[in-house]
Image (spheres, helix red, strand yellow):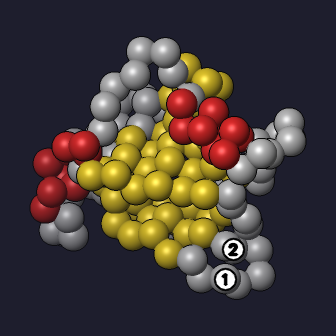
């Protein structure tokens, strides 16, 4: 499965489970999220009656990432992205900031985002993540 496949899906809510930097070959950053059509399932997970899918999202490398508690996120109408819970930004203030501050050349740098109901995770990388469905 590719990240763009998840971007195309609508009607799901995701919750943040963990983020780590395992530093294994091919994995510099790992994000674990849970997804369900029913937000209540994510609140009671791992209850056996809930219908939750867990994804492991591995970035082979990254430039930077940010995890912000949802109460502190601010909507910006000037940002342009595809997707709902799983997003790829075409224009964002975070991407502009990273390119300016780190003086990055115009490479194929992308802003990936996970809009969880309790957190917002942003990753800037020039590498596509590898997606694995765990459960």
Q: Which residue appears at 27% of the width and 52% of the height?
A: 69
Q: Image check: 9 left or right of 132?
A: left
Between 95 and 38, the one nearer to me in the picture:
95
Where is residue 76, by image quadrant? Answer: top left
How far apart are labels 1 and 2 at the CA level? 6 Å
Q: Image check: 89 left or right of 76?
A: right
Q: Image check: 51 left or right of 106?
A: left
Name the mark on residue 27. Answer: 2
Name the mark on residue 118. Answer: none
Callout 2 secondary element = loop
Q: Which residue appears at 19% of the width and 53% of the height?
A: 41
Q: Which residue appears at 22% of the width and 55% of the height?
A: 42
- Is 113 placed above or below 59 here? above
Callout 1 secondary element = loop
Check contact, mark 1 vs mark 2: CB within 8 A. Answer: yes
Name the mark on residue 23. Answer: 1
Pick the quarter of the image with the C terminus.
bottom left
Q: Position of residue 128 (x, y in %)?
A: 73, 51
Q: Which residue appears at 63% of the width and 33% of the height?
A: 96
Between 54 and 31, the one nearer to me in the picture:
31
Where is residue 18, by image quadrant? Answer: bottom left
């Amino acid at each position: 499965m590719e990240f763009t496949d998840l971007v195309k899906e609508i009607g799901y809510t995701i919750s943040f489970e963990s983020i780590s930097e395992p530093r294994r070959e091919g994995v510099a950053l790992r994000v674990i999220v849970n997804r369900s059509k029913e937000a209540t399932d994510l609140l009671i997970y791992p209850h056996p009656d809930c219908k939750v899918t867990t994804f492991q999202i591995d970035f082979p490398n990254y430039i930077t990432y940010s995890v912000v508690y949802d109460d502190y996120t601010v909507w910006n109408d000037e940002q342009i992205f595809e997707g709902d819970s799983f997003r790829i930004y075409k224009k964002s203030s975070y991407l502009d900031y990273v390119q300016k501050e780190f003086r990055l050349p115009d490479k194929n740098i992308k802003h990936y985002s996970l809009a969880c109901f309790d957190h917002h995770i942003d990753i800037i990388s020039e590498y596509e993540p590898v997606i694995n469905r765990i459960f």
